[in-house]
Image (cartoon, grey):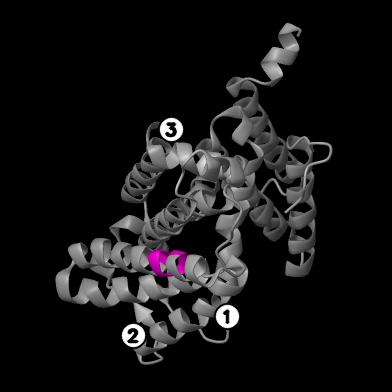
Amino acid sequence: MSKFQKFKQSQAFGLLLLIFIAFVFWAFFKMLAPETFGDFNKLQTYLKTALYYAVGGCGLYFICVMGPFDMSVGANIVLSSVIAVNMSKQFGYAGLLIAPIISGVLVGLLNGIVYIKLRISSLIVTAGLSLVYEALSIYATNGKEAILATNYRAFGDYPWNLVLALAAFFLCGFILKYTKIGTYTYAIGSNEVVAKNMGVNVDKYKVVAFTLCGLFVGIESILTISYGTSMTSASNLASMSRNFPPLMGTFFGLAFKKYGHPIVAIVIGEFIIELLFEGFVALGAPTTVQNIVTGIVLLAIVTMTIKPVKGAVVK
């Protein structure tokens, strides 16, 4: 194997590739819309949005790397955000920080238990439970908009949003790299049957994965309500649209997992997606065009970074 081939498999190559992709999109839109896109202040705003999506993407990574999926992330965000607003009125910052994390963890735990007990597709289970969580969000708000008080919005801007997000990223990285949970998560994702034959309690660690997803979605909810300052309850699966921004970052994490730094890939991936969205906004492109091009670009990036294995079963 040549030195270049070894370099292409290194962590440094993966990181440089991510940075290069981000730079290419920034330069492309900057040339087309120099006045309305990509100056330093705008890049800070793009990063602000990418941070809280990336926190949710870290949570989804635990599930998606195993094979299942969670369609209730959006409903969890809505429910945990309105609970955060309600609890902040009673307990201040303690309520704002603790309540949505507890809510997110309980939602994730329930998702995992129901998924394991019913033995049906995680898509069906979590989509069905989304209706329950949306109904609870309506009950928690009496159908009214939940607005976070101005004196509890510190986590919606720098530096506290960055502090909370970095804490979440380091926690996710630590769990994946240094704990049995991370080891078994990758083992189950690699080959569930082999992992089970080696004595891994697959059902237990799938529940743990859903619970961890809920934990990080709860943290995302803190950043979401602090940045957006208000949340409206959802119904009829209207919260589904909130599933996909964090999922896009998860795709990057899965695609760049082979380079050994999925968390970094999730964060930079969310920033890349945000560059795409904001670039099309700066160009005045319709939302439909933005979604089409973003989807195509995302598929292209994932396709280029994942090498298909001949004879492998595609799930």
Q: Kindly identify the amino acid type of the residue bearing the numbered disc 3.
A: Lys
Residue shown at 60% from the left, 36% from the top: 257
Is residue 267 visible to us here? no
Place residue 128 in its image quadrant. Answer: bottom right
Q: Which residues are magenta?
A: 108-112
Q: Position of residue 17 (x, y in %)?
A: 67, 29
Can you tell which mark lies on residue 238?
Answer: 1
Place residue 195 in its image quadrant. Answer: top right
Residue shown at 28% from the left, 69% from the top: 150
Q: Kindly identify the amino acid type of the residue bearing the numbered disc 2.
A: Ala
Q: In the rendered image of this protein, does residue 98 appear above or below residue 10?
A: below
Kindly report the distance in space between the C-alpha atoms of the residues bearing marks 2 and 3. 38 Å
Q: Tell me which label, 2 or 3, sits earlier in the chain.
A: 2
| Front one among 64 and 299 | 64
| Front one among 5 and 150 | 5
* Residue occupied by mark 3: 177
Left or right relative to 35: residue 243: left
| Front one among 258 and 242 | 258
Is residue 159 visible to us here? yes
Q: Quadrant of the C terminus?
A: bottom right
Q: Position of residue 59 (x, y in %)?
A: 47, 53
Kindly report the distance in space between the C-alpha atoms of the residues bearing marks 3 and 1. 36 Å
Residue 21, magenta (yes or no): no
* Residue occupied by mark 2: 140
**Which callout, 2 or 3, points to the residue nearer the camera?**
3
Q: Tell me which label, 3 or 1, sits earlier in the chain.
A: 3
